[in-house]
Amino acid sequence: MTTRVPWDSDSYLALARRACFICELLAGNPDYPHHVAYRDGTAIVFASKFPSVAGHFLVAPVDHREHAIADFTPVAAR
Ligand SMILES: [Zn+2]
């Protein structure tokens, strides 16, 4: 179950500038709670705290990445 949280831009910016929210979620920091739907050694899938549509989930690697494009390499289709 996902609880919709009212948008608070000041709180969001403070959290975003303090640390990587995905790494903090993975570490179990209670300041970064999310509903986790799936996690393995490669990736994590979790519900957005600020969903733009119902069922908005995010998929991220468990290894920290800074750049959404530059820090990934192409993987050949299996
Ligand atoms: Zn990170």
Image (cartoon, helix red, strand yellow):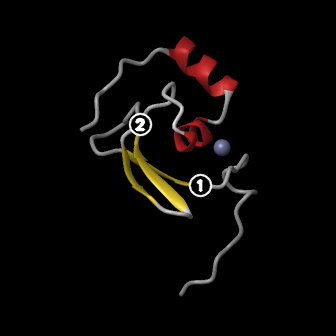
Is 37 situated left or right of 74 in this image?
left
- What's the residue type where badge 2 is placed? His
For ligand 1, the image quadrant comes to top right
Q: Which sits in the foreground, 71 or 21?
A: 21
Q: In this view of the protein, which residue sits in the foreground, 6 or 61?
A: 61
Query: Mark 2 — residue?
Result: 34
Q: Which badge, 2 or 1, comes first in the chain's sequence?
A: 2
Residue 72, given in percent of the width and then of the height, sits at 70, 62
Q: Residue at x 55, y 63 (%)?
A: 41
Question: Residue 38: which quarter of the image?
Answer: bottom left
What element does badge 2 sit on?
Answer: loop
Q: Which residue is mark 1?
A: 62
Please tell me how crowded label 2 is: few (under 14), some (14-19), or many (20+) other residues with Cα within 10 Å: some
The answer to whether residue 27 is left or right of residue 57 is right
Secondary structure category for the residue under label 1:
loop
Question: Closer to the camera, 73 or 31?
Answer: 31
* Residues marked 2 and 1 touching at CB (< 8 Å): no
Q: Is residue 40 left or right of residue 63?
A: left
Q: Position of residue 58 (x, y in %)?
A: 45, 48
Q: Is residue 6 left or right of residue 58?
A: left
On whether ligand 1 comes within 8 Å of the CB at mark 2, the answer is no
The residue that appears at 48% across and 62% down in the rendered structure is 40
Which residue, as the protein is rendered here, is positioned at the far left? 1
Q: Quadrant of the N terminus?
A: top left
Residue 30 in percent (x, y) is at 48, 28
Outermost residue, right side: 70
x and y, in percent, of residue 44 in the image: 48, 54
The residue at the point 27 percent across, 41 percent down is 54
| Point 29% across, 45% down: residue | 55
Q: Amino acid at mark 1?
A: Val
Mark 1 Cα shell of 10 Å, populated few (<14), some (14-19), many (≥20): some
